[in-house]
Amino acid sequence: MALKNFKEAVVVITGGASGIGLATAQVLSLAGAHVVLADINEQGLQQAAEQIKQHGAPGNVITHRTDVTNEEQVQALMQTALDTCGGRIDLVITSAGIGCGNLIDMFSGQEMQTLMNINFMGTYHCVRAALPTMRQQQSGHFVFLSSAAGKLGIPLLTAYCASKWAVRGFSSALRAELYGTGIDVTTVYPSWVDTPMTQQEGMELLNIEAKLAVEQVAEAIAQAVLQGNHDLTMAPDEGTAVLLQIMQNDQEKAEQLVGKAFHERLKQFSGGKA
């Protein structure tokens, strides 16, 4: 059964200490949800909870330090939600994630494994931990944070793209697997969001045109859940929006356009030597 409103809903949010996770927690708390915030950053987690409470949210705000790459810790997180919020879980938002870029030649196997462990396996662990409760309830909703990079191929972000494409494929298969159960999945594909990832050294080569505010993404997530939308793609910058459309119709052309533009910028930045 789809969520009609968030009053008294039990919501678990990973990556809740900052960014999209915190912004979404604020929106849902003000709408009356009981929020269980999870993050590996314990100090940031406590600050986030205080920040939400200061805004006068009517629901409970509970924190649980969690490393989403650790299956046992994620299981403990969901048990905390059950124990403290009435024995149910209505919504799980997997916002925990990292992003970093480099030429694939310079990206180590360990760095790649870390990206996959957090961005994809963290999502997988949350589903495995929350699904038994949702099946028993015959209701529930997952929101997975993918990215526009989960629909495009972006130079310097090959590893990040791999992790976000994995989330996309997982969510599509899971929706089919859960058909008719009362449990649904929304996958979020935001373009550039104003977070530290977009400020990393070398990102200027990607010619980022516009950035989404985390508050914009949070509000859109809340609406997507209530409306039962499966695909929430947010691309305010014209360049990304056009590329997404081309990718749908002609993947090879999209790859060629992105590759050509990247190498032209690389040549400019290297004084014409690339």
Image (cartoon, rainbow, N blue to C red):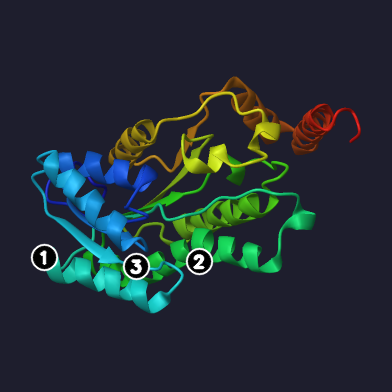
- The location of residue 164, given as percent across then percent down, is 57, 51
Extreme residue in the right direction: 273
Residue 48 in picture, x, y percent from top left: 25, 49
* Residue at 51% from the left image edge and 53% from the top image edge: 98
**Residue found 47% across the figure and 54% down from its top:** 97
What is the spatial separation of the Cα atoms under label 1 and label 3, in whole angstroms? 21 Å
Q: Earlier in the sequence, mark 1 or mark 3?
A: 3
Query: How far is disc 3 from disc 2 in space, using C-alphas?
Result: 13 Å
What quarter of the picture does the C terminus occupy? top right
Decide: is 272 above or below 196: above
Name the foreground residue: 201 vs 215.
201
> On the image, numbered disc 2 is attached to which residue?
121
Q: Which residue is labeled 1 in the image?
A: 86
Mark 1 → mark 2, Cα distance in angstroms: 27 Å
Which numbered marker is on residue 220? Answer: none
**SS for callout 2:** helix
